Image: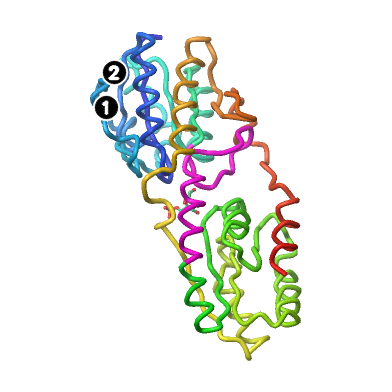
Amino acid sequence: IKCIGILTSGGDAPGMNAAIRAVTRSGICNGFKIKGIYKGYEGLINDEVRTFTTENVSNIIQTGGTILRTARSKEFMTLSGRKKAYETLVKESIDALVVIGGNGSLTGAKDFAEEYDFPCIGLPGTIDNDLYGTDNTIGYDTTLNTITQCIDKIRDTATSHERIFFVEVMGRDAGFLAQNSAIAAGAEAAIIPEDSTGSDQLIEFMERGIRKSKKSCIVIVSESPKCGALYYANRVNQEYPEFDVRVSILGHLQRGGSPTARDRILASEVGYGAIQALVQGQRNVMVGVRNNEIVYVPFVDAIGKRKNIDKQLIKVLDELSI
Ligand code: F6P
């Protein structure tokens, strides 16, 4: 391997730039040429490629978003799209690929690696924290802190008006952001997909809340097409009309901002780990950090196995929100 291509794909996550910097600098240190591929797999298909020097990644460790831009490429999901991508790699003399992204992006890397017998390394870049085999994903810690700060602010107005707030947070189909931000912000409850009794949970919570005669409260709800914050707010309006209810959907502000130190360190470690993986002849693995150690997780496991929420966290929130 002489030349390594790097791209970011899927939803951006704070810390992606720190990862781009780490892969570029560690790659150069180890004698590789590094090429940045713009707009994820779209840029690979359309040959939007530029050689990276160490200066290209100066002054970016502290910035959110991704300097490489990103996309959710539909074309890369097709055989013909992946063929075009392969042709770009041949034309650009790129002989290994580092993909920074979440579940969908690493699925694309896995399919491509298998079809073209091409060395691909994945880095866990998603705010959702839903990749198996790594304790945390790049962006998760920053987003958790952002959500916590937002809930703190919502708490001020909820208390002043004695209202119930349903705050909807991202996470795709995982409840890591909801459960942990609820604990961090001292919210009264979290409704997460991992707890399938979601609707009963609401009644239970309302009745407990009424008993406690709390005047205001905050319920964090994981995004969901059918059972998001609006769904629960409507139910409370109908079933408990004596309460004053409001909804706050935090949306994409959760994905922005300067990465926390923890995200920068994780991104730096796994970026370094990606180059080490290639030096050691590893391929088709995601680099993660588990129990403070860099680990190589086969793509099939990283995307195929379900990362479970620690059930103890549900108990912690329940007991502390009395
Ligand atoms: O996977 C990251 C994420 O932010 C999810 O939490 C969310 O469901 C989704 O991306 C939103 O995607 P988009 O930016 O395409 O609306």
Q: Residue at x 35, y 22 (%)?
A: 24
User: 215 or 237, which lies in front?
Assistant: 215
- Whole-percent x, y for residue 39 in the image: 32, 38
Determine whether 168 is above or below 67 in the image: below
Q: CA distance from mark 2 to mark 1?
A: 8 Å
- Whole-percent x, y for residue 245 in the image: 55, 82
Colour mode of the rendering: rainbow
Q: Amino acid at mark 1?
A: Val
Q: Is residue 92 left or right of residue 179?
A: left
| Crowdedness near tag 2: few (<14), some (14–19) or many (≥20) residues, C-alpha within 10 Å | some
What segment carries the magenta color? Answer: 125-152
Residue marked by disc 1: 49
Residue 86, by quadrant, is: top left
Q: Secondary structure at mark 2?
A: loop
Q: How many marks?
A: 2
Determine whether 226 is above or below 254 in the image: below
Q: Earlier in the sequence, mark 2 or mark 1?
A: 1
Residue marked by disc 2: 92
Is the C-beta separation of discs 2 and 1 under 8 Å? yes
Name the quarter where the C terminus is drawn: bottom right
User: 183 or 277, which lies in front?
Assistant: 183
Q: Residue furthest bottom?
A: 242
Residue 41 in view (yes/no): no
Q: Amino acid at mark 2?
A: Glu
